[in-house]
Image (cartoon, rainbow, N blue to C red):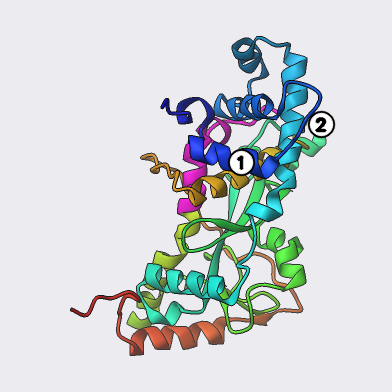
């Protein structure tokens, strides 16, 4: 059977799962399957309505209408595809997975890894356009995401302009404001661009440089091993939809969050069926900024980090699924 990934960026199995989730019995237009393929081809060729129009021999206005409609439909299934662990067993599997990534039992309460990703856009005209320019001086919109140990997104929050600090995006996100995840006693791993917190959202970050003491250095090493899964998740998504993420998105800035969310949903669907793309060489990772603004009603996670660091120094470095034979 012909591979569908070169043209649509999804395997046949991933495509089948997507169509089952959409389950759209459309009585008007071209039909659900064709319109979904048009949307995926549009993503694959870098959001060019002109190229899609020629490939499918239809007016650009029709392509535009189909793309926006299918994007809305894909975003509508978000909660079915991007969600927190549903059961205690699912949570335990995630935590064991992170301890395995870290190669240390001290990380058995890690329940996710968080980071922000800048997506290049064509900025809006006028004075508002400047606020989309990030610290690397290109216009972008921020995707904040939390992933599990396999790189599956379990929470996404997208839409803030690129000039906003990751820590500020976090403080305005439902994840922070609702404080429903992770469960008590668990924490999320974050880089140095975030504050180390115990409450309201438990975030454990690495020790800042210069790192003093062997214990802190060892902790940072294990922390990095586990936390870097979020960078790999972004890398896999960018590799799959490289035409979207490796150049400026030429759509209206208000439509960009829909496109990014759709890509995150498709990323999860692909992982679920084993449709995994190897990271391309030279994948660009966002550098961590210095810790952002401090909130007044937060409790520092530094004592908790010190406790975890002590556990790293005290406990043997044994993989969770170690074979003792």
Report whether residue 195 is seen: yes
The residue closer to the viewer here, 65 or 254, is 65
Name which residue lies at 49% across and 56% down: 151
Q: Is residue 310 magenta?
A: no
Q: Which residue is at a point 44% across and 48% down the rendered structure image?
A: 274
Mark drawn on residue 18: 1
Q: Are marks 2 and 1 in contact (CB under 8 Å)?
A: no
Secondary structure, magenta segment, majority class:
helix
Is 117 drawn above or below residue 52 in the view shown? below
- Counting from the top left corner in percent of width and height, residue 159 is at 73, 47
- Image coordinates of residue 279 in percent, x first then y, are 40, 43
* Label 2 residue SS: loop
Q: Residues within 10 Å of mark 1 (few under 14, many from 20)?
A: many
Which dot, 2 or 1, sits closer to the camera?
A: 1
Q: Looking at the image, is mark 2 or mark 1 earlier in the sequence?
A: 1
In this picture, which residue range is highlighted in magenta? 232-252
- Name the quadrant containing residue 262: top right
In magenta stretch: residue 242: yes
- Left or right of 151: which side holds 318? left
Residue for point 80% across, 27% down = 27
Q: Quadrant of the C terminus?
A: bottom left
Where's residue 310, x and y in %? 41, 88
Location of residue 114 by image quarter: bottom right
Q: Which of 252 and 26 lies nearest the eye of the viewer?
A: 26
Q: Is residue 39 left or right of residue 44?
A: right
Measured from the top left, where is residue 311 in percent x and y?
40, 87
Q: CA distance from mark 2 to mark 1?
A: 38 Å
What residue sits 58% from the left and 33% below the top?
244
Which label number is shown at residue 126? Answer: 2
């Amino acid at each position: 059977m012909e591979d569908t990934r070169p043209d649509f960026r999804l395997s046949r199995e991933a495509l089948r799962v997507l169509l089952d989730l959409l389950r759209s019995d459309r009585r008007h237009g071209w039909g659900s399957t064709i319109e979904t393929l048009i949307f995926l081809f549009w993503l694959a060729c870098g959001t060019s309505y002109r190229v899609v129009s020629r490939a499918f021999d239809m007016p650009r206005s029709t392509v535009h209408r189909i793309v926006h409609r299918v994007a809305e439909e894909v975003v509508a299934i978000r909660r079915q595809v991007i969600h927190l662990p549903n059961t205690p067993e699912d949570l335990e599997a995630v935590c064991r997975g992170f301890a395995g990534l870290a190669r240390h039992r001290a990380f058995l309460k890690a329940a996710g890894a968080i980071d922000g990703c800048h997506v290049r856009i064509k900025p809006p005209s006028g004075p508002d356009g400047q606020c989309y320019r990030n610290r690397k001086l290109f216009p972008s919109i921020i995707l904040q995401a939390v992933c599990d140990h396999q790189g599956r997104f379990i929470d996404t929050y997208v839409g803030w302009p690129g000039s906003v600090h990751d820590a500020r995006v976090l403080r305005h996100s439902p994840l922070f404001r609702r404080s429903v995840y992770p469960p008590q006693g668990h924490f999320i791993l974050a880089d140095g661009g975030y504050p180390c917190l115990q409450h309201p959202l438990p975030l454990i970050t690495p020790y800042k440089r210069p790192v003093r003491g062997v214990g802190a250095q060892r902790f940072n090493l294990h922390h990095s091993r586990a936390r870097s899964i979020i960078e790999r998740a972004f890398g896999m998504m960018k590799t799959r939809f490289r035409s979207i993420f490796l150049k400026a998105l030429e759509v209206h800035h208000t439509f960009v969050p829909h496109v990014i969310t759709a890509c995150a949903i498709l990323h999860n669907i692909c992982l679920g069926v084993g449709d995994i793309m190897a990271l391309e060489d030279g994948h660009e990772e966002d550098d961590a900024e210095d810790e952002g603004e401090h909130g007044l009603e937060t409790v520092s996670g530094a004592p908790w980090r010190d406790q975890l660091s002590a556990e790293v120094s005290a406990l043997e470095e044994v993989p969770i699924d170690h074979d003792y034979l």
